[in-house]
Amino acid sequence: MMNKEKNTGKDKGDNLTRLNKYIANAGVCSRREADKLIEAGAIKINGKVVTELGTKVKTGDKVQYGEQILSSEKPVYLLLNKPKDFITTTDDPQERKTVMDLVKRACKERIYPVGRLDKNTTGLLLFTNDGELAKKLIHPSHQIKKVYHVILEKPLTKNDMLKIAGGLELEDGKADVDKIAWVEPEKDKREVGIELHSGKNRIVRRIFENLNYKVYKLDRVMFAGLTKKDLPRGKWRFLSPKEVNLLKRIS
């Protein structure tokens, strides 16, 4: 009696990929959202609308979302130590320096920044073409930890530090902070470390500006467990398999 072949994911030499994974790897959305696009009839394979979940794509198939031809590339995960004066965008009509200029020779795959750092903020910025992971890392429900090193124009008082720790009311709601402390309280109370989960725009700067402190320097030193260790300013590196696995285990 012949043994049954295992489902190896291959058919006549062609690699098969689940359609929702293919769409997510193309950077469109998460797998769950890709399922909704499939059910809604928004996806075509080789010119035909596909609505069946679990459909697989083989090498050479043309997958379309609207007028866009999708490309499922191998997942890439890259960490940049962003310098000052670079904006976080994939394209700028004003032709200013963008973070893409710093990583354009890193790989042949199209990668995108996860979230953003403003022009004057330095530090950790993750790039990937894994749309599912990127969406998870920026969604508020996943509470991704971020740590910043802040240098203020004047010393932070104990009273104001307690106000920040208690949560300030800003124009778009309460700014909750997990931890805040002076970096070296005996030397310079202008230097502060702050840990929070919020992904709101310019949240750290706005927290201090709310109490009339001007932020002189702002550096993101930790993002989702990743650190700047051995990564000089303006340089990038690929994540290790262990780091990628840790990110994917975030629930």
Image (cartoon, helix red, strand yellow):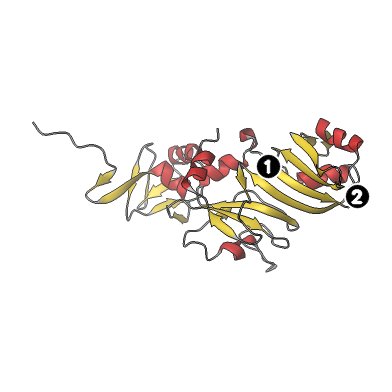
Q: CA distance from mark 1 to mark 2?
A: 23 Å
Determine whether 157 is above or below 128 in the image: above
Q: Residue at x 48, y 36 (%)?
A: 32
Residue 206 sits in which quadrant?
top right
Q: Position of residue 197 (x, y in %)?
A: 69, 37
Evaluate whether residue 217 shows in this view. yes
Question: How far across and down, in percent of the image, does residue 54 sit?
Answer: 36, 37
Q: Label 2 is placed on what type of residue?
A: Lys
Q: Are marks 1 and 2 in contact (CB under 8 Å)?
A: no
Instruction: Give how far across and how far down residue 188 sits, in percent.
Output: 86, 48
Quarter of the image with the C terminus is top right
Q: Residue at x 46, y 50 (%)?
A: 75
Residue identified by numbered label 2: 154
- Give, as a three-letter code, the residue at label 1: Lys
Mark 1 residue element: strand
| Residue 176 screen position, x and y as percent | 76, 34
Q: Residue at x 65, y 63 (%)?
A: 98
Residue sitting at x 89%, y 47%: 213
Mark carried by residue 232: none
Label 2: few (<14), some (14–19) or many (≥20) C-alpha neighbours in 10 Å: some
Secondary structure under the numbered disc 2 in the rendered image:
loop
Q: Quadrant of the N terminus?
A: top left
| Marks 1 and 2, the one that precedes in the sequence | 1
The vertical placement of 106 against 72, above or below, is below
Relative to 49, is 200 on the left or the right?
right
Along the line of sight, the residue nearer the viewer: 101 or 45: 101
Q: Which residue is mark 1?
A: 146
Residue 251 vs residue 244, the one in the foreground:
244
